[in-house]
Amino acid sequence: MRRILAALSLTLLFAGGLVAIDEPGSRTSSDKAKPTGKADKGTSGWDVDAFIKLYDKDNDGSLSMQELPERYRHNFARIDTNKDGKLSREELRRGMLHLHPRRRPSDVVFNLVEMSDCDECCAEELQRIYAFLRKLDTDRDGKIHADELKTAREGLLQARVDRIMKELDADKDGKISREEAKGQIKKFFNDLDANKDGFIDRAELMRGAAEKPAEVSPRKDGKQQKKAGAPSEKNESK
């Protein structure tokens, strides 16, 4: 189970299916095709020379579109800066980040299957995902449509708001006063209280919960900061 948690924490960076033996940066790629002389691994640890040797069928020291496996072709034109139809050693070194296969948020499922060291725990998590997806498919056609997703999102938001109201509305008047507010609700009270009557009603809370994530704006010191927005669910009522 600990590996499941580790996989989930790295999903945005490394989500995907089985790791290819020739993945740029992998040891197997370097071991499989060791170039003569000093290898150029740069700061990334990726052996560019080994990668070229692995696929350079005509031995011209560069890689054409046809020589590359399909999973590495999606950014070929972007990496080929001189537009000669080939990727040179220098172009590959500079464009390494664009060479990696595309990753998708749904790849987390592959991580759960591949990286678990506890099949019973993993099966339980996958069953939870499977049950939720089946619930989304309201017309039972085996597909999840945009309108079904929208309906499910609204249902989740309503359940979330109901839970907050039940937890914070101590006097059960259908509103959250400034005194009743806690955590992020208290912190963002003025933003959530749209009509400025000193209370947050269900409609105002629903509107705040449905807001998109706050944008990131640059700070004067060069760092980034988030603009004030709706509270996160994790700390909303603590």
Image (cartoon, rainbow, N blue to C red):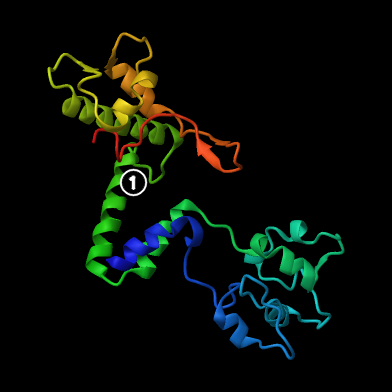
Front in this rendered view, residue 219 or 31: 219
> Which residue is the extreme one toward the left?
171
Task: Please determine whether, in this image, residue 62 is positioned above or below residue 193.
Answer: below
The residue lying at 86 percent from left, 61 percent from top is 82
The residue lying at 40 percent from left, 36 percent from top is 149
In x, y percent, where is residue 234?
A: 30, 41
The residue lying at 46 percent from left, 31 percent from top is 212
- The quarter holding residue 163 reads top left
Task: Please determine whether, in this image, residue 97 is positioned above or below residue 90.
Answer: above
Which residue is label 1 attached to?
Answer: 133
Task: Please indicate, yes or no, whether residue 65 appears anywhere in the rendered image.
Answer: no
Task: Please determine whether, in this image, residue 6 is positioned above or below residue 140.
Answer: below
- The quarter holding residue 74 reads bottom right
Image quarter where the C terminus lies is top left
> Which residue is the extreme one toward the front?
221
Task: Please indicate, yes or no, whether residue 194 appears anywhere in the rendered image.
Answer: yes
Q: Residues within 10 Å of mark 1 (few under 14, many from 20)?
A: some
Image quarter where the N terminus lies is bottom left
Front in this rendered view, residue 195 or 207: 195
In x, y percent, where is residue 102?
A: 58, 58
The residue lying at 12 percent from left, 17 percent from top is 171
Give the number of callouts.
Answer: 1
In x, y percent, where is residue 195?
A: 37, 9
Front in this rendered view, residue 91 or 171: 171
Left or right? Give the position of 173 relative to 190.
left
Amino acid beneath label 1: Leu
Left or right? Give the position of 235 relative to 92.
left
> Which residue is the extreme one toward the bottom?
36
Left or right? Give the position of 158 relative to 143.
left
- The quarter holding residue 201 reads top left
Determine the secondary structure under disc 1: helix
